[in-house]
Image: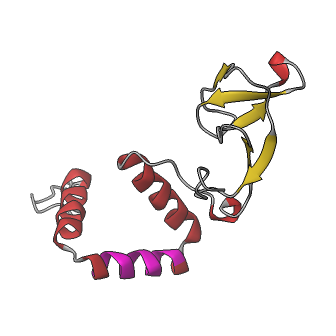
Amino acid sequence: MSPIITQPGAPAHVHPDEAARRRRDRLARATAGQAEAALAYLSAIDPLMFEIAMDAADLAVGEAPRDEAAGDEAVPVCRRCNRQVGIFLDHGPDWQHFNGDWTTAGAQEIYDPGHPVEVTWRLPGENLATA
């Protein structure tokens, strides 16, 4: 039996790094309309991949992913000072003033502003100074 000798040739597939570079370059050349159309198409053919891509884009530009379903949900604030308030069971069942984000995973700092909490509810983005 004779050995099989293969002839050198070009690889059947482009190297993954080269393919990624080509996609990155193509994206850099895309207009805003092309990028929007590409994302709209991606959202139609693979909704999960669309969500992953949008979350990754939010992280890349330093923005927290926003849950559109929760966008109309009112949040608790103090009527007196218009600052955010919440209940932190580690500190008791009462409302507390705090600094931080609105997520349970974020870092919150509870503080005493010198007055008791007077809870009212506001929509996100609502001007608290005039509400």
What sort of colour scheme is used for the picture?
secondary structure
**Stretch in magenta:** 34-43
From the image, which quarter does the C terminus lie in? bottom right
The residue at the far right in this view is: 93
Rendering coords of residue 116 (x, y %)? 80, 26
The vertical placement of 9 against 120, above or below, is: below
**Residue appearing at x 44%, y 49% in the figure:** 63
Q: Nearer the viewer, residue 122 or 68?
A: 122
Q: Nearer the viewer, residue 63 or 80?
A: 80
Quadrant assignment, res 119:
top right
Rendering coords of residue 115 (x, y %)? 75, 24
**Residue appearing at x 70%, y 28% in the figure:** 97
Predominant SS of the magenta segment: helix
From the image, which quarter does the N terminus lie in? bottom left
One can see residue 9 in this view: yes
The vertical placement of 65 against 42, above or below, is: above
Rendering coords of residue 81 (x, y %)? 66, 37
Rendering coords of residue 46 (x, y %)? 54, 72
Q: Tell me if residue 39 is in the magenta stretch.
A: yes
One can see residue 1 in this view: no
**Residue appearing at x 54%, y 62% in the figure:** 51
**Residue appearing at x 61%, y 32% in the figure:** 106
The vertical placement of 91 against 70, above or below, is: above
Q: Nearer the viewer, residue 58 or 124?
A: 124
Left or right of 55? Residue 61 is left
Quadrant assignment, res 27:
bottom left
Q: Nearer the viewer, residue 102 or 69?
A: 102
Q: Tell me if residue 57 is in the magenta stretch.
A: no
Left or right of 46? Residue 2 is left
Q: How many marks?
A: 0
